[in-house]
Image (cartoon, helix red, strand yellow):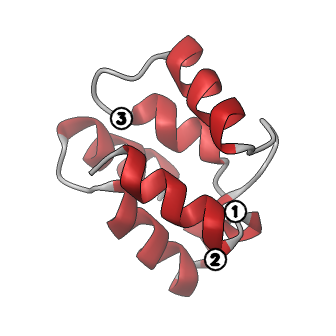
Amino acid sequence: MRAELKALIKMGSLSISEVLEKSDSNEIISRTKVLAVLESMPKIGKVKARRIMKEIGIAESRRLRGLGDQQRAALVSEFS
């Protein structure tokens, strides 16, 4: 499931807002690390993903289910 999720993100079929919506109802997606999701996004590498997370104030070990409302909103606005 995680591999499929990352592949869909990489192809651009899923946006960050769609991933966050799915994480509310899917336990496997909710346990995926934010860093892994960001690194799967097109044109976002390891360094840029970590920089974005640091700017927003998200720990590298944070999982999708652990994000607060402001962090979710900041991620969505960063990639929209």
Disc on the earlier residue, 2 or 3: 2
Q: Which residue is mark 3?
A: 41
Q: Nearer the viewer, mark 2 or mark 3?
A: 3
In the image, residue 47 lies at what x, y percent? 57, 12
Q: Are marks 2 and 1 in contact (CB under 8 Å)?
A: yes
- At mark 1, the secondary structure is loop
In the image, residue 42 lies at what x, y percent? 28, 28
Give the distance between the C-alpha atoms of the residues marked 2 and 3, in whole angstroms.
21 Å
Q: Nearer the viewer, residue 54 or 3?
A: 54
The amino acid pointed to by label 1 is Arg
The amino acid pointed to by label 3 is Met
- At mark 3, the secondary structure is loop
- The number of discs equals 3
- At mark 2, the secondary structure is helix
Rendered position, 52 above or below 76: above
Quick one: label 3, few (<14), some, or many (20+) residues within 10 Å?
Answer: many
45 horizontally vs 58: left or right: left
Q: Nearer the viewer, residue 51 or 36?
A: 51
Rendered position, 29 above or below 80: below
Q: State which quadrant residue 53 falls in.
A: top right
- At a point 27% along the width and 48% down the height, the residue shown is 8
Quick one: label 2, few (<14), some, or many (20+) residues within 10 Å?
Answer: few
Q: Residue furthest top?
A: 47
Give the distance between the C-alpha atoms of the residues marked 2 and 1, in whole angstroms.
6 Å
Q: Which residue is mark 2?
A: 27
Q: Which residue is mark 1?
A: 31
